[in-house]
Amino acid sequence: MPSVHVVDHPLIQHKLSILRNKETGPKEFRELTDEIALLMAYEVTRDLPLEEVEIETPLAKVRARMIKGKKLGVVPILRAGLGMVGGILKLIPAAKVGHVGVYRDPATLKPVEYYCKLPADASERDFIVVDPMLATGGSAAATVGFLKERGVTNIKMMCLIAAPEGIAAFHSAHPDVPIYTAAVDSHLDERAFIVPGLGDAGDRLFGTQ
Ligand code: PRP
């Protein structure tokens, strides 16, 4: 059974609706993407393991819980995934960041890799791959494939909007990787854009329309 977590917190849904609005400009679009990524990171990290440590409050010694030295990594899929990195790093400042450049060939709709730089110790880390849009799922599946080739075994995929077609394709390629998304939209159009979606996330983030 594919694991899809729809993170439907009211703050996330409210901010996502402003993102979808075509009148929202790049400045606000960037700020909201950052905020939603932070809020989603709270949910994506819910199962991080804890350990008990002894600390001393001003009043007494106590055994208290802290995150168990887990090494995390974040991989934005260029370009649009870059907009989600800052928000996640606010919650997980020790995470290392790898970059994977993939664009979708507009004619074939297939992902084309043009850049890949991961932390040297990637195989020891758990990764969150981020991209606002999971359309055909090709870019995300290819990126997760690169991580697995480098020995990464624990990966989560985080996006803002997913299409049912993309969820199905991604899960058939990587059934072990859960998807966290703020919304599952209706369908893909003939150009493989998510409908209703929010348009081209990269262009809206960076004002390149
Ligand atoms: C968009 C989006 C995803 C990809 C999703 O990127 O940001 O990376 O398409 O499509 P898929 O699920 O069908 O692969 P785009 O190729 O427009 O590149 P950009 O981020 O540089 O704008």
Image (cartoon, rainbow, N blue to C red):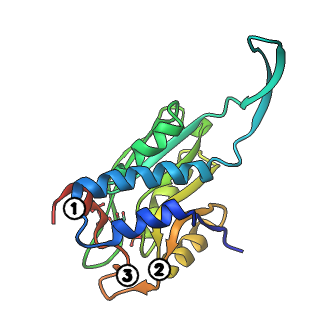
In the rendered image, residue 112, in percent from the top left (x then y), is placed at 32, 63
CA gap between label 1 and label 2 equals: 22 Å
Mark 1 or mark 2, which has the lower sequence index?
1
Which residue is disc 3 drawn over? 196
Within the image, what quadrant is residue 70 found in?
A: top right
Name which residue lies at 15% across and 66% down: 209
Residue 124 relative to residue 74: left or right: right
Residue pointed to by mark 1: 25
Q: Seen from this angle, which residue lies furthest bottom?
A: 190
Q: Amino acid at mark 3?
A: Pro
Q: Amino acid at mark 1?
A: Gly
| SS label for mark 2 | loop
Task: Give x and y (percent) for residue 84.
Answer: 40, 51
Q: Nearer the viewer, mark 1 or mark 3?
A: 1
Contact (CB < 8 A) between labels 2 and 3? yes
Label 1 vs label 2, nearer the camera? 1
Categorize mark 3 by other alpha carbons within 10 Å: few (<14), some (14-19), many (20+).
some
The numbered mark, 2 or 3, whose residue comes first in the sequence reads: 2
Q: Are marks 1 and 2 in contact (CB under 8 Å)?
A: no
Is 70 located above or below residue 176 in the figure? above
**First in sequence: mark 1 or mark 3?**
1
The answer to which of 102 and 50 lies nearer the viewer is 50
Q: Which residue is mark 2?
A: 185
| Residue 154 coordinates in the image, percent (x, y) | 64, 49
Q: Using the image as rendered, state which of residue 172 and residue 22 is in the foreground.
A: 22
Residue 161's place in the image compared with 101, above or below, is below
- Looking at the image, residue 104 sits to the left or right of residue 131; the answer is left
Mark 2–mark 3 distance (CA, rounded to whole Å): 7 Å
**Is the distance from the Cβ of mark 3 to the nearest ligand 1 atom less than 8 Å?**
no
Q: Position of residue 207 (x, y in %)?
A: 17, 59
Residue at 33 percent across and 57 percent down: it is 80
Amino acid identity at mark 2? Asp
